[in-house]
Amino acid sequence: MIHYIYLDGINALKELNWEAFLNNYLEKNRLVIKEYCNNFFFTKEVPWERCIEEYKKHWFEESKNREDLFSKFNEEKIRFNVSKGIDKIKEVFPEAEDIDVYVLIGLYSSNAFQYFLEGRPAVGLAVEAHGTTFFGIPMPYEDIPLWLSHEIGHALHYKNPSHPLAKWLYQNGLKLDKAVEELPLFEFLIDEGLAVMTTRWVFPEEPLHKVLGYTEDVYQWFVNNEKELLSRLRNIWDKPPGKEEYFRYFSGYDESIPPRTGYYIGMRLIESFIERHPEIDKSELFTIPAEEIVSPSS
């Protein structure tokens, strides 16, 4: 189900009415927004007061952020492309019908994301990140379906409570910050690889650089450096990454490699497994342990 909760706050933001924004958007959608803030700060519990402070600072005290949003904001395109994306995803993965999607006003931290609400995987899409570019990445409204399918790929992975990664998260309070300190790096590479492949399966006509969320130049860099990257990661992927290594490979904290290197490597690991097992159904891939997928003997 799609929840357009940004509608509860967009007019108050236009009118610079902080009290209306606080009561009608933040407090009304407290459960959703608080989990968004937990995701944003990469921890399980962020004080609600801090979340409120960040929203007030970002949207009501820094005018440039509002100007950037409303210079490109197009509600019709947002709703059209969200609906288009969900319909297309359900054609390939009917089980995605059960995943809640929240279209919200965020803090310019992520364009789209998967998180947990009341113990269930859900997906969020932040309106402020779409329309032009986002941290240098082209982010037209027409690409919303691609980003949604990526995050729904994560949610499909976590919907299976018997899968090792999902099982660990459910047994440990859904604490991703703890997971990166205890689980091997390959778990996160495969998780991102499945998300990328979800987009490829749903939108096979799209060029790979767009599926991965890269520019063409960045995609070509990965193609040219794939062997070196795989060699480097094989030496460390059976160890927990910790926050530093996690951000290095899944965000943009290392200037020596492009952001989100783990997306490309994860995709290639999934592709390699499919090449070894051409008979496998795509839905079955969400149930196979990551350790088995990265093992060249499997």
Image: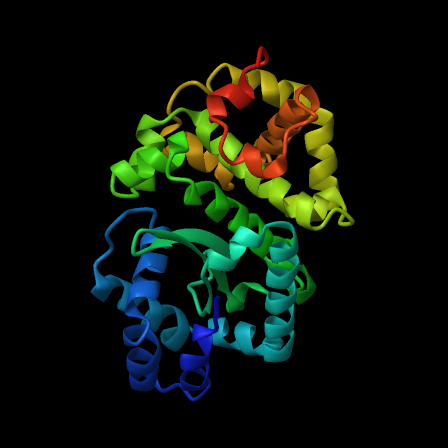
Return the x and y of residue 119 as percentages of the image width and height: 31, 51
Q: Residue at x 29, y 56 (%)?
A: 118
Return the x and y of residue 138 as percentages of the image width and height: 67, 57
Q: Residue at x 36, y 30 (%)?
A: 242
Return the x and y of residue 271 as percentages of the image width and height: 66, 29
Number of marks in the rendered image: 0
Return the x and y of residue 237 as percentages of the image width and height: 47, 21
**Depth order, front residue of 87/122:** 87
**Depth order, front residue of 154/134:** 154
Tell me the quarter of the picture where residue 8 sits: bottom left
* Quadrant (top left/top right/bottom left/bottom right) for the C terminus: top right
Q: Residue at x 33, y 82 (%)?
A: 24
Is 105 positioned to the left or the right of 271 in the image?
Answer: left
Q: Residue at x 47, y 26 (%)?
A: 289
**Depth order, front residue of 46/157:** 157
* Above or below for 290 versus 248: above
Is 56 positioned to the left or the right of 88 in the image?
Answer: left
